[in-house]
Amino acid sequence: MNLWVQSIEGEGSTFSFTIRMQKSDTTSFAEALKDTKQGVKAAIDKLYRKRVLLVEDNDMNQELAIDLLEAKGLIVILAENGQEALDILQSKEFDLVLMDIQMPVMDGYEATRKIREQDRFKDLPVLSMTANVMSGDRDKAREVGMDDTIAKPIVPQDMFITMAKWV
Ligand code: MN
């Protein structure tokens, strides 16, 4: 693994890394898509009319994600925290859950843990949305049963490709 850090006084640090991973069906699918226009289009086609539970407490992030997803024909239901997400999951079917981490009432880790405790949700894709992809969040996200991570700030084409891997 290669890891490097770039620090700018007063602005913070950027951590970068490369890592070799075992190939699986999902990673080769993502590789096939890459960042090409066709790849993004294929991802968006695959997501059309899919039902997404967006779990996010921040107004601006809610609005941004809903706009991006609805513009591509996805059906979005909003939950403002983990507990609300669990309640909504009792009565509605979803193809995928987008889960913020830090939320009032119940955070994304606990909500995911409680989702995974229920057998009928064992195959429901749960993707975290986090700005802190290097601070151990990815490990913790995997540990509680999240399938993948979408980095904030959201890069639309990356988000669509990652989501398409899991639906
Ligand atoms: Mn939050």
Image: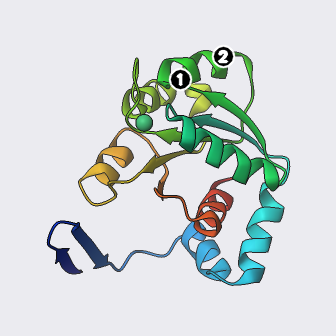
Q: Which mark is residue 118?
A: 1
Ligand 1 lies in quarter:
top left
Q: Residue 101 in the image: x percent, y percent?
A: 40, 38
Question: Most extreme residue toward the left, as rendered?
Answer: 9
Residue at x-position 45% and y-position 44%: 146
Q: Residue 94 in the image: x percent, y percent?
A: 72, 35
- Quarter of the image for the N terminus: give it: bottom left
Count up the numbered dots. Answer: 2
Mark 1 residue crowding within 10 angstroms, few (<14) / some (14–19) / many (20+)? few
Q: Residue 27: in sight, yes or no?
A: yes
Question: Most extreme residue toward the front, as rendered?
Answer: 10
In this rendering, position of residue 105 left or right of residue 97: left
Task: Indicate the quadrant where residue 79 lies.
Answer: top right
Identify the amino acid type marked 2: Gln
In this rendering, position of residue 40 left or right of residue 105: right
Residue at x-position 60% and y-position 39%: 62
Mark 2 residue crowding within 10 angstroms, few (<14) / some (14–19) / many (20+)? few
Q: Residue 123: in sight, yes or no?
A: no
Identify the amino acid type marked 1: Gln
Residue occupied by mark 2: 90
Task: Indicate the quadrant where residue 66 lies.
Answer: top right
Q: Which mark is residue 21?
A: none
Q: Are marks 2 and 1 in contact (CB under 8 Å)?
A: no
Looking at the picture, tell me which residue is in the foreground, 18 or 28. 18
Q: Is residue 130 above or below residue 54?
A: below
